[in-house]
Amino acid sequence: MKFKITLKDPDGVYDAIRAAVQESLPEELTLNEQEAVGEVRENEVKESLSRWFLYNEYLTVEVDTDNNTITVMEQT
């Protein structure tokens, strides 16, 4: 059997992206530099995730119980 589930987490995606970007920033940057570079990187990551996340919060997966798989669906 196949069916789709749409998950909504408005803060989860934002928080995960922000944490990953903050961890990737070099410590030698000033606070202002970190904020500026961080904002650019966050926007780049959000753009790359838009393939799967609608409005940065909706994710749809397709569950296939016959094959025991879950597939992340692309947003259209």
Image (cartoon, rainbow, N blue to C red):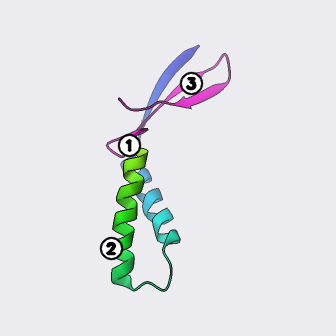
**Which element is circle 3 on?**
strand
Q: Report the side of 72 relative to 46 (left or right).
A: right
**In the picture shown, does residue 56 fall above or below 29?**
above
Which percent across, then down, holds residue 8?
39, 40
- Mark 1, Cα crowd under 10 Å, few <14 / some 14-19 / many 20+, is some
Distance (Cα) linking label 1 and label 2: 22 Å
What range is drawn magenta here? 51-76
According to the picture, the residue beneath numbered tag 2 turns out to be: 36
Which image quadrant for residue 1?
A: top right
According to the picture, the residue beneath numbered tag 1 turns out to be: 50
**Which element is circle 2 on?**
helix
**In the picture shown, does residue 37 fall above or below 70?**
below
Tag 2 or tag 1, which sits nearer the N-term? 2
Residue sitting at 64 percent across and 19 percent down? 65
According to the picture, the residue beneath numbered tag 3 turns out to be: 63
Which percent across, then down, holds residue 66?
66, 16
Residue sitting at 38 percent across and 52 percent down? 46
